[in-house]
Image (spheres, rainbow, N blue to C red):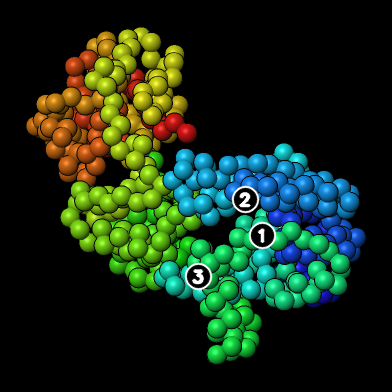
């Protein structure tokens, strides 16, 4: 058994010399098997081992007995251990999650905390081949794509590893028996309240008896083939993501450009999924339904909005899809927000305005700096000598007008925003740079004709706008 696990570890490059492995130890047969095997391979692998146990406070006295068992086991094995208690029912209520998802999030938050503070670099979980088969069937019945049918990956993020995914539950139980180990048994694993338990206790045994005696191995082989295909498609979707997705300059929304939706659907859906994961920082709260809701949104009229999990919403803005946090949906900047300075004070201080910083400097000799007149929308130059005395930065007001560069007549700022397809909720956040009573620049959008630099300009005002990190 040890040789088989060792080969699996080496074939999948799960562990390297010097790794500090944190074993997720529930006290049950699987995690006890994993811990024991790694300890027996410790010298050969040249690794350090510790264990972590999260008490979910769900099973009364049994949960505390599990905790004591883990502590005593780790003391006997002379390995460091970490224990934490979390009221999962309260956690689930607070974050509006299922108990299963709440437990998972709390566990991995705990593990990450240990990795950060105690020098461990990998987390080993005790998923086995039966867990893989159950996961595939569970996802199949919920509705999933190719990635979901690939099941549990042997490693993730070069941090989470599953060294006994190659072993069946029967093999794990035999190992426990041979080694005379006495694991804790979670009685809830035999309750058919949970769908996963129904798969374990009813569906897989039925399939094994009536269709395929090797159904667990068959599903595991299928998962490996699908994972290989999925890896190739993911490489294509990553290229598409980099091509069509970007952060906006205004509210740091995640933008999916309309050209994305001309690609093959298999790529589009994956790019959307990766986008919502990045925007929400969650891998587990989105289903294919949400992906196709966004896909349908791309075909709707501009201004249409849909709500998504994790306080995310998507909006169609002239064919582009903007992913945003609800916390920003109703943000408004007060009419009182205004920064005023005298022309004489230019360059002394960095101006902060809402989500932006604005730096101004005066160039007395054009030869001192190569002027970037067109390449950067957030760096602009103005004829400093045309300014009488006051420079200000403010938000837009009703009726604001300016003479856009290259035009003779004034145009409403509102119409400029419409022409440039700036979303309504972003317009109040965009800084307007004003000289005396005139609007000289709608930052990142359009500059005015009045203050453009010419060959006769002597003193030039350079303005650099940056979004705060």
Q: Earlier in the sequence, mark 3 or mark 1?
A: 3
- Where residue 327 sits in the image (x, y, percent)? 36, 37
- Where residue 372 sits in the image (x, y, percent)? 38, 36
Residue 78 relative to residue 10: left or right: right
Q: Earlier in the sequence, mark 1 or mark 2?
A: 2
Q: Find numbered disc 2 in the image and state the secondary structure of the residue it sits on.
A: loop
- Where residue 439 sits in the image (x, y, percent)? 21, 24
Q: Find numbered disc 1 in the image and state the secondary structure of the residue it sits on.
A: loop
- Residue 140 shows in this picture: yes
Quarter holding the N terminus? Answer: bottom right
Q: Nearer the viewer, residue 353 or 324?
A: 324
The residue that appears at 53% across and 49% down in the rendered structure is: 102
Q: Nearer the viewer, residue 317 or 305?
A: 305
Q: Earlier in the sequence, mark 3 or mark 2?
A: 2
Question: Would you name the residue on which mark 1 appears?
Answer: 186
Tell us which disc is closer to us: 3 or 2: 2
Q: Does 8 sit above or below residue 98? A: below
Question: Would you name the residue on which mark 3 appears?
Answer: 138
Mark 1 in CB contact with mark 2 (< 8 angstroms)? yes
- Where residue 243 sits in the image (x, y, percent)? 41, 59
Crowdedness of circle 1 by 10 Å Cα count: few (<14), some, many (20+)?
some
Please tell me in which quadrant of the rendered image residue 2 appears: bottom right
Residue 423 relative to residue 353: left or right: left
Q: Does 216 sit above or below residue 95? A: below
The residue that appears at 34% across and 40% down in the rendered structure is: 326
Mark number displayed over residue 378: none
Q: Find numbered disc 3 in the image and state the secondary structure of the residue it sits on.
A: helix
Mark 3 in CB contact with mark 2 (< 8 angstroms)? no
Mark number displayed over residue 59: 2
Crowdedness of circle 2 by 10 Å Cα count: few (<14), some, many (20+)?
some
Task: Give the Cα separation between the discs numbered 1 and 2.
Answer: 9 Å
């Amino acid at each position: 058994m040890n040789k088989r696990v060792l080969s699996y570890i080496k074939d999948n490059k799960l562990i390297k010399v010097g790794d500090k492995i944190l074993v997720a130890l529930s006290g049950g047969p699987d995690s006890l098997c994993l811990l024991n095997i790694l300890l027996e391979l410790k010298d050969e692998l040249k690794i350090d081992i510790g264990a972590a146990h999260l008490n979910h406070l769900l099973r009364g006295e049994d949960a505390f007995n599990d905790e004591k068992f883990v502590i005593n086991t780790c003391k006997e094995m002379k390995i460091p251990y970490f224990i934490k208690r979390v009221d999962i029912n309260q956690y689930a209520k607070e974050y509006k999650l299922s108990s299963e998802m709440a437990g998972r999030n709390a566990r991995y938050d705990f593990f990450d905390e240990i990795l950060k503070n105690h020098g461990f670099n990998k987390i080993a979980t005790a998923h086995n081949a039966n867990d893989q088969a159950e996961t595939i069937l569970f996802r199949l019945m919920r509705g999933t794509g190719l990635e979901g049918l690939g099941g549990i990956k042997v490693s993730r993020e070069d941090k989470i590893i599953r060294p006994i995914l190659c072993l069946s539950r029967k093999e794990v139980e035999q190992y426990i028996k041979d080694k005379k180990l006495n694991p804790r048994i979670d009685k809830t694993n035999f309750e058919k309240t949970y769908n996963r338990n129904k798969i374990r206790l009813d569906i897989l045994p039925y399939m094994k008896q009536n269709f395929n005696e090797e159904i667990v191995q068959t599903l595991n082989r299928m998962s490996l083939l699908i994972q290989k295909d999925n890896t190739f498609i993911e490489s294509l979707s990553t290229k598409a993501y980099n091509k069509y997705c970007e952060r906006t300059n205004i509210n740091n929304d995640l933008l999916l450009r309309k050209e994305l939706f001309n690609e093959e659907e298999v790529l589009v859906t994956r790019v959307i999924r990766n986008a919502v994961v990045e925007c929400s920082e969650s891998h587990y709260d989105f289903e294919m339904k949400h992906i196709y809701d966004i896909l349908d949104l791309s075909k709707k009229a501009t201004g249409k909005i849909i709500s998504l999990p994790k306080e995310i919403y998507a909006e169609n803005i002239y064919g582009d899809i903007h992913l945003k946090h609800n916390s920003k949906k109703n943000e408004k900047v007060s009419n009182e927000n205004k920064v005023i300075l005298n022309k004489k004070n230019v360059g002394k201080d960095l101006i902060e305005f809402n989500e932006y910083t604005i730096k101004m400097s005066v160039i007395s000799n054009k030869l001192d700096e190569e002027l970037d007149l067109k390449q950067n929308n957030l760096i602009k130059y103005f004829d400093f000598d045309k300014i009488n005395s006051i420079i200000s930065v403010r938000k837009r007001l009703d009726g604001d007008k300016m003479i856009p560069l290259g035009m003779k007549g004034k145009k409403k700022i509102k119409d400029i925003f419409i022409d440039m397809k700036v979303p309504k909720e972003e317009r109040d956040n965009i800084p307007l740079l004003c000289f005396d009573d005139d609007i000289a620049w709608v930052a990142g959008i359009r500059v005015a004709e009045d203050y453009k630099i010419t060959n006769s300009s002597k003193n030039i005002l350079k303005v650099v706008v940056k979004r705060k990190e």
